[in-house]
Amino acid sequence: MEEIKLAAELRDGKSTKKTLTTLRSAEKIPGVVYGGAKPPILITLSERDLMAARRKGGINAILHLDLGKGKETVIVKELQRHPVSDRPVHADFQRISLTQKIEAKVPLHIKGEAPGVKLSGGIIQHELRTLHVRALPTAIPHFIEVDVSALELGQAIHVKDLKPVKDLEVLDDGERIILHVTLVKVEEVAPAADATAAAAVAAEPELASTKGKKDEEGKLVAEKPKPGAPAAPAAKEAAKK
């Protein structure tokens, strides 16, 4: 693991919301350093310098903070970000010793193209994106590769399937699934055409040929005219005969 030097400043414990807002406006990040036999201390450092260090050395980069009157060897334990801008707003640093093992989370990176995706139309479903490990700070890698070049549809890669990394102890259960190739589930939606047609029929006005009462066989039965009502044309013709 690469070691990087960063300049930082001590800050007092009376930081108000206004003070912290001013710091962030100046592209500085408030932070706290804790762990080891020493008490926690509050610091500030350049947002640009910290993000550059993480891009260069990874999320578990070893940082040597120069505080002017003292130095601290740390890793970033947690980086809080703004929910909208995604800019870092606070950093927690853990003191470390280069001769003592620590626990950390290492990102998993996919390597290769799975036949189950390329040839069978599947997709890769991720179940685990980081690996929980224990090692000396200098032995923790930037990331761990997950080779999917032989992964067929319906197959999975477990933690135990990963290639061992020298001097690195994996703390996750070996049976845990990291990823697997599966088919995309498509939900079938019933077409609305039938419902629309039914609604149209229901709304269609009844034709004259379908009006009237029907007998037991379903044949129309002529209705008796109301007293004083004009006779139907068919009745007039019958009367003439």
Image (cartoon, grey):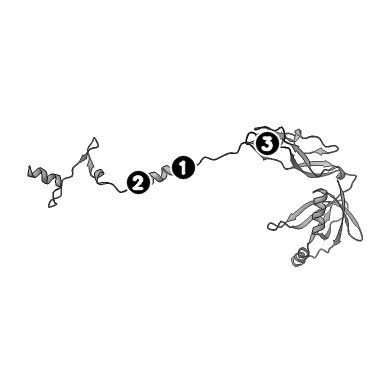
Query: What x and y, as percent, mark residue 51?
Result: 79, 55
- Vertical relation: 206 (above or below) 23: above
Q: Amino acid at mark 1?
A: Pro
Please say if 69 is above or below 193.
below
| Circle 1 crowding by C-alpha within 10 Å: few under 14, some 14–19, many from 20 | few
Secondary structure under tag 3 reads strand
Instruction: Report which residue position mark 3 lands on.
Output: 180
Which of these two is toward me, 81 or 148? 148
Helix, strand or loop status at disc 1? loop
- Numbered label tally: 3
Q: Which residue is mark 1?
A: 191
Inspect the image, locate mark 3, and give the three-letter code of the amino acid beneath it.
His
- CA separation in Å, label 1 and label 2: 18 Å
Residue 202 vs residue 136, the one in the foreground: 202
Give how far apart the Cα atoms at labels 3 and 2 are.
50 Å
Q: Is 185 located above or below residue 37 in the figure? A: above
